[in-house]
Image (cartoon, rainbow, N blue to C red):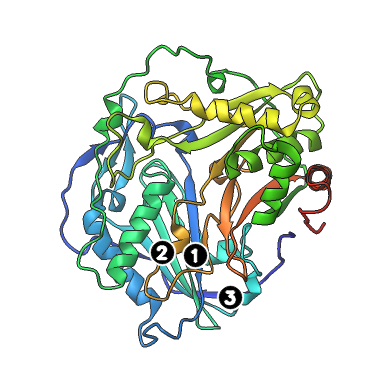
Amino acid sequence: MKTKALTFNVTRRVPELIPPAKATPHEMKYLSPIDELESLRYQAPVVSFYPRSESAAHAKDPATVIRKAIAEALVYYYPLAGRLRGNSKPQLVVDCTGEGIIFTEADADVSIDEFGDPICPPIPGLSELLSDVSGSGGILGCPLVLAQVTRLKCGGFVFATRFNHALCDGVGMVQFLTAVSELARGWPTPSVHPLWHRHLIRSRRPQENTVARREFDHTITPLFEQDELMIQRSFIFDDYQVSSLRRHHIGKSSSCSTFELIAAIIWRARTMALKFDPREEVRLLVAVDIRNKFNPPIPIGYYGNVIAAPAAVTTAGQLKANPISYTVELIKSAKASVNADNLINVPCVVGARSFTLSDVRRLGVQYVDYGWGKPEYGGFPIWGGGQAPYASFLIPVKSPNGENRSVVPMSLPQPAMVSFAEELDHMMNNDALHSSL
């Protein structure tokens, strides 16, 4: 579907710092080797759209409720109220100063239904819904979380946040937001006790790999030209389309997850659309949560980064010549290669011939309820985070009849985007996947 053009006006109050509601320890906390990776040194936005709820206590203002709940949650998550520093090692440390996070209260002359049906990324007007407050966009010495509540003219509201990814992964971000939501609904304490426990990963040392880990190759892959016109579009998959893909390309000879199947056709269509030389090497990096790869597993409550990005690697020619089942098996093998002894050196591979896809459907941000019910949309508002346009997500979206649907936002040069949509249609035999040009 097309990126929806939408303009609206926002009136903001002066941004403020929200410190923890009570005094918290002033100490230095070290990050884990995964937290310190260069590829995670960016700001990750999360946005949720809440319609007017007749069951909510409308005498209460969402900005007031959420502001108070954030202050209470920061008592438990007090490192997020600090500032990230560098030291002479070099290492990153969190200075738990208790200064707080930045919060902005706003009003917009737009209704929730104007954002689309379904609402999906790229979210129009994101810069209005999450204002880049001066001094907030850096990695070191800046607030670690930026938040904005924007009331809409229809009675709904948008809650947008931006996290320093060095502090937490998607699971950790949603864990914090869930704690805020529980406190907003009157819970005395969060249901999950947060754990810092970075020593659980810091104590591990990478061992010699017994299998080739291609994501660690230092391959130079060119970037898109800065002056290229990049087009952003979202491609939606429902249960029928996924079933059609399985029937046409997998059959009964193999099994795979929905993510592996969609990742395979996205990677193949993108590679063919960009018209690489058949001899050129292409790779798909699959971001995966590896909490259960440890023995014992990382405990519930840990909110640091516990992710790896194993790579499926082949040539453009092989990807085109072989069936989708070949691509699926490459992805499955890459995911199976990850273990707790070889995950520390997660790579940062960015370029046109490399693409990263993350499955965020089970993070749970689409269920976070601050007292106004579940959001119409909850998730990442843009494609790729700090690696756009070389990365994207598989994101859950609502459908009118309640069926499961997922969206993959893509960003490609204009001619490649047309070819990409055509390749997807071809792989679906033109009968299940539709995306208006």
Residue sticking out furthest to the bottom: 59
Compared across the picture, whether 203 is left or right of 156 comes to left
Report if the CB atoms under discs 3 and 2 are less than 8 Å apart: no
Q: Secondary structure at mark 2?
A: loop
Q: Quadrant of the N terminus?
A: bottom right
Residue assigned mark 3: 112
Report if the CB atoms under discs 2 and 1 are less than 8 Å apart: yes
Vertical placement of residue 248 versus 432, above or below? above
Of the residues tagged 2 and 1, which is closer to the observer? Answer: 2
Residue assigned mark 1: 48
As drawn, the label of residue 368 is 2
Q: Is residue 397 visible?
A: yes
Nearer to me, 324 or 156: 324
Q: Position of residue 305 (x, y in %)?
A: 38, 39
Looking at marks 3 and 1 on the same chain, the residue that comes earlier in the sequence is marked by: 1
Q: Counting other residues with Cα less than 10 Å from the Cα at mark 1, is it few (<14), some (14-19), or many (20 or more)?
A: many
Q: Position of residue 94 (x, y in %)?
A: 28, 41
Nearer to me, 324 or 161: 324
Q: Position of residue 278 (x, y in %)?
A: 80, 22
Q: Counting other residues with Cα less than 10 Å from the Cα at mark 3, is it few (<14), some (14-19), or many (20 or more)?
A: many
Q: Secondary structure at mark 3?
A: helix
Q: CA distance from mark 3 to mark 2?
A: 18 Å
Vertical placement of residue 378 versus 110, above or below? above
Q: Inspect the image, locate mark 3, and give the three-letter code of the amino acid beneath it.
A: Ile
Q: Counting other residues with Cα less than 10 Å from the Cα at mark 2, is it few (<14), some (14-19), or many (20 or more)?
A: many
Vertical placement of residue 128 versus 89, above or below? below
Compared across the picture, whether 388 is left or right of 205 comes to right
